[in-house]
Image: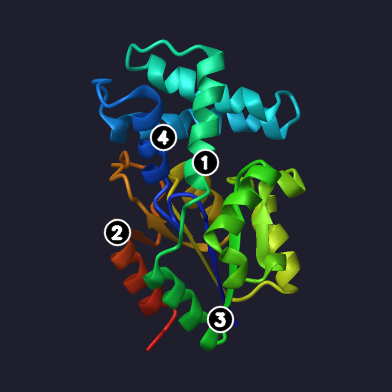
């Protein structure tokens, strides 16, 4: 039996698109900040703050404000907490219109037709993450019971326990387990530590340092990801 699981943000869809649209609407087009770099920094800050949220030390609003204030601050732009939270509301509105591409939908259908179990492992606050998952229509493609959200179980990637949670829901540990995700620290390190094989969707072109653990495969585009998944799982 074979299993493949996907991350959600920046894997099943391009997370930078709703972020870019929200920044342009809220802050205007004349910030003078490279939006790709701002987005990457925001993702790093989000991961930093989320650990405190998951541990119950801080509320979810802390992460929403922190990642905006810290990311913009790195580029010399001060953002008040009030404005950071207002920006979050705009960002969430754009996240409500996200979608999984027809090509990825087709891939998941082909995996299912081939008898391959497909799941999701995603970090995030439960309500917020499920809102995105539902907006994407993921439960139409993958059974809800095989969608693991960190906010529901108290463990987050890169912790091994979140991968074990999906294994428990599947009911067995398959011989061949693949994970596809974009974040090196969470998705690559987490899946390798859990004994899964990994396809790193390196959408932002991060360069690894010498000695850092390598994923089994690295892809840079959605088309390449679809092709490599099909190859390693033997799709026609």
- At a point 43% along the width and 77% down the height, the residue shown is 106
- In 3D space, how far apart are the residues under numbered discs 3 and 1 (Cα atoms)? 34 Å
- Would residue 207 be found to the left or right of residue 25 on screen? left
- In 3D space, how far apart are the residues under numbered discs 4 and 1 (Cα atoms)? 8 Å
- In 3D space, how far apart are the residues under numbered discs 2 and 1 (Cα atoms)? 26 Å
- Mark 1, other Cα within 10 Å: few <14 / some 14–19 / many ≥20: few
* 73 to 192, vertically: above or below: above
Q: Which residue is mark 4?
A: 22
**Which tag, 4 or 1, sits closer to the chain's start?**
4
Spot occupied by residue 143 in the image (x, y as percentages of width and height)? 66, 71
- At a point 40% along the width and 71% down the height, the residue shown is 102
Q: Which residue is mark 1?
A: 93
Q: Is residue 165 visible?
A: yes
Q: Which residue is mark 2?
A: 221
Q: Secondary structure at mark 4?
A: helix
Spot occupied by residue 133 in the image (x, y as percentages of width and height)? 59, 56
Q: Which of these two is toward me, 95 or 116?
A: 95
Q: Which residue is mark 3?
A: 116
Q: Quadrant of residue 194?
A: bottom right
- Mark 3, other Cα within 10 Å: few <14 / some 14–19 / many ≥20: some
Q: Quadrant of the N terminus?
A: bottom right
Q: Which-is-in-front pick, marks 2 and 4?
A: 4
Q: Which of these two is toward me, 207 or 96?
A: 96
- In 3D space, how far apart are the residues under numbered discs 2 and 3 (Cα atoms)? 23 Å
**Which tag, 2 or 1, sits closer to the chain's start?**
1
Q: Disc 4, disc 1: CB below 8 Å?
A: yes
Spot occupied by residue 195 in the image (x, y as percentages of width and height)? 57, 61
Spot occupied by residue 26 in the image (x, y as percentages of width and height)? 41, 26
* 133 to 89, vertically: above or below: below
Q: Disc 3, disc 1: CB below 8 Å?
A: no
Q: Which of these two is toward me, 11 or 232?
A: 11
- At a point 53% along the width and 30% down the height, the residue shown is 88
């Amino acid at each position: 039996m074979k299993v493949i699981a996907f991350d959600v943000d920046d894997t099943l869809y391009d997370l930078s698109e709703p972020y870019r649209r929200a920044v342009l609407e809220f802050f205007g087009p004349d910030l003078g900040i490279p939006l790709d770099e701002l987005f990457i920094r925001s993702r790093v800050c989000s991961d930093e703050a989320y650990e405190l949220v998951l541990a119950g030390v801080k509320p979810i609003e802390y992460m929403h404000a922190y990642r905006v204030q810290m990311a913009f601050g790195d580029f010399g732009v001060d953002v008040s907490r009030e404005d950071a939270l207002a920006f979050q509301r705009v960002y969430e509105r754009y996240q409500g219109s996200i979608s999984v591409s027809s090509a990825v939908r087709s891939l998941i259908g082909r995996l299912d037709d081939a008898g391959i179990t497909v799941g999701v492992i995603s970090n995030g606050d439960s309500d917020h993450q499920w809102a995105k998952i539902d907006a994407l229509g993921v439960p139409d493609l993958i059974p809800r019971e095989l969608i693991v959200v960190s906010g529901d179980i108290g463990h987050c990637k890169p912790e091994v326990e979140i991968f074990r949670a999906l294994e428990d829901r599947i009911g067995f540990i398959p011989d061949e387990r693949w994970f596809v995700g974009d974040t090196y620290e969470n998705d690559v390190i987490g899946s390798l530590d859990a004994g899964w094989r990994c396809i790193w969707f390196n959408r932002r072109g991060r360069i690894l340092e010498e000695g850092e653990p390598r994923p089994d495969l690295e892809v840079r585009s959605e088309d390449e990801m679809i092709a490599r998944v099909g190859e390693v799982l033997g799709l026609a």
